[in-house]
Image (tube, rainbow, N blue to C red):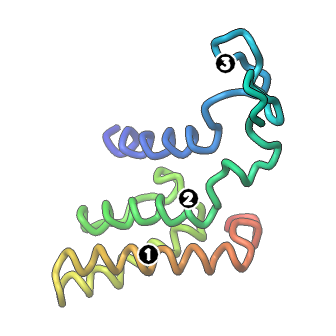
């Protein structure tokens, strides 16, 4: 039960990041609506219709989630189930490579060096993975 609860926190965080804070057309407290493309009382434009204006790039989300679980895996000295971590198969492959390298670095140069390696390698792995198509590479990627 403990592993399930530990995986729930990051999954809820990711869900909150992906859904945002408000709904288009919801009121702003003054009775007026504050939907995409609307203007406030001063005539200033509201949020744009472009999802990229507020969305976190997928490679950045990948980096945050994989780095988090890489640190946990390094600390716990064991690999968990990628599905309970909320990772795709491709993200889990990045994690395994990163953690293997981080364990070697930790033995050689200490924990701080291993954490820096996790940050570098996770970012590079996620950027490469999304540059090549990310989860659309195949049915289990």
Residue 68 occupies quadrant: bottom left
Disc nearer the start of the sequence (2/3): 3
List x then y, in percent, for residue 134.
Answer: 69, 70
Is residue 33 shown above or below 66?
above
Disc 2 and disc 3 in contact, CB within 8 angstroms = no
Judge from the rendering whether residue 85 lies leftward or rightward of residue 88; answer left or right.
left
Q: CA distance from mark 2 to mark 3?
A: 28 Å
| Callout 2 crowding tier (Cα within 10 Å): few <14, some 14–19, many ≥20 | some
Q: Which residue is mark 1?
A: 96
Judge from the rendering whether residue 8 lies leftward or rightward of residue 139; answer left or right.
left
Q: Residue at x 80, y 34 (%)?
A: 36
| Callout 3 crowding tier (Cα within 10 Å): few <14, some 14–19, many ≥20 | few
Judge from the rendering whether residue 103 lies leftward or rightward of residue 127; answer left or right.
left
Disc nearer the start of the sequence (2/1): 2
Q: Residue furthest bottom?
A: 108
Q: Which residue is mark 3?
A: 28
Q: Which residue is mark 2?
A: 61
Q: Residue at x 39, y 73 (%)?
A: 119
List x then y, in percent, for residue 90.
Answer: 60, 70
Q: CA distance from mark 1 to mark 3?
A: 45 Å
Residue 46 occupies quadrant: top right
Residue 108 occupies quadrant: bottom left
Helix, strand or loop for disc 1: helix
Disc 1 and disc 3 in contact, CB within 8 angstroms = no
Helix, strand or loop for disc 2: helix
Q: Residue at x 79, y 43 (%)?
A: 48
Disc nearer the start of the sequence (1/3): 3
Q: How many numbered discs?
A: 3
Q: Nearer the viewer, residue 25 or 98?
A: 25
Is residue 64 shown above or below 8?
below
Q: Residue furthest top?
A: 31
């Amino acid at each position: 039960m403990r592993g399930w609860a530990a995986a729930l926190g990051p999954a809820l965080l990711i869900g909150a990041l992906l859904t945002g804070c408000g709904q288009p057309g919801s009121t702003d407290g003054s009775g007026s609506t504050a939907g995409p493309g609307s203007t406030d009382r001063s005539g200033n434009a509201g949020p744009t219709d472009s999802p990229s204006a507020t969305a976190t790039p997928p490679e950045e989300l990948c980096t945050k989630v994989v780095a988090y679980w890489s640190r946990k895996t390094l600390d716990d000295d064991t690999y968990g189930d990628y599905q309970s971590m909320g990772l795709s198969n491709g993200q889990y492959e990045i994690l395994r490579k990163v953690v293997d390298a981080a364990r070697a670095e930790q033995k050689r140069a200490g924990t701080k060096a291993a954490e820096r390696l996790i940050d570098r390698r996770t970012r590079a792995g996620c950027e490469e993975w999304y540059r090549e198509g990310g989860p659309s590479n195949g049915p289990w990627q």
